[in-house]
Amino acid sequence: MSATSKIADPQGKALGVAITDIDNDGWPDIVVANDSVRQSLYHNRGDGTFEDIALPAGMGYDENGKTFAGMGVDAADYDEDGYPDVFITALSYQTYSLFHNSGDKTFTYDTNLTGVGPATQVYSGWGTRFVDVDNDGLQTTTPAAQEYRQGIHHGLAECGSGVRDAACGAWRGSRRFEQRRAA
């Protein structure tokens, strides 16, 4: 089935997979986090086949055109513009990646604009999930991350949001992140 649907990728390592509808056409698309090779974004053609559009969509590499160690991935509309954005964790000394969905099957690399880059550079991230942890209607990310030397669980939070779960955070308005730590 993978070969006939055109999602078989012998180069991809598929450490994380997220199912989302990137263009709101009603068909589920597939985002794949790959370790040390380009990331994959399979757009559903609606006929049982998919096309990998990661390169033209601006999601294959980081903002410098380099591969990164994609580990976990999830998609949700973090900025409430109606289109799912993509968050991918990576190994330490690489930043996690936040790809903002432009609504036209293209993405901008908002990792540094939002503060995700500096907040995550020294952490290895594994899985991640967007959830509404406090029932405020906003998507929150909970990356499973570890800073090995200190045993710290790492999460991201909305700036100025007050005290929230120490390992989780939500984004609103400013599209800016700050880091939270919990022992």
Image: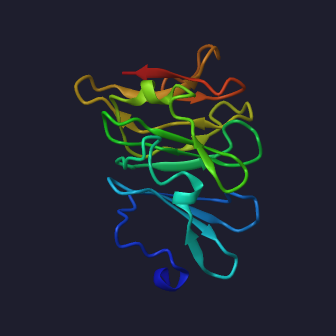
Relative horizontal placement of residue 12, taking residue 22 as reference (left or right): left
Between residue 125 and residue 104, name the one nearer to us. Answer: 104
Residue 148 horizontal/vertical position (percent): 25, 30
Q: Does 45 sit left or right of 147 as displayed?
A: right
Q: Quadrant of the C terminus?
A: top left
Of residues 155 and 24, which is closer to you in this image? Answer: 24
* Residue 8 appearing in the image: yes
Does residue 18 appear in this view?
Answer: no
**Corner quadrant of residue 172:** top right
Which scheme is used to colour this image of the protein?
rainbow
Residue at figure coordinates x 48%, y 80% from the top left: 2
Q: Is residue 78 above or below residue 35?
A: above
Q: Is residue 66 left or right of residue 175?
A: left
Q: Is residue 81 left or right of residue 109?
A: right
Residue at position x 49%, y 74% from top? 7
Percent across and percent down for residue 13 are 35, 62
Q: Nearer the viewer, residue 47 or 67?
A: 67
x 66%, y 66%: residue: 28
How many marks the image carries: the answer is: 0
Give how far across and how far down residue 82 sits, in percent: 77, 46
Q: Reply above or below: 143 against 68.
A: above
Quarter occupied by residue 124:
top left
Residue 163's quadrant in the figure?
Answer: top right
Q: Residue at x 73, y 50 (%)?
A: 103
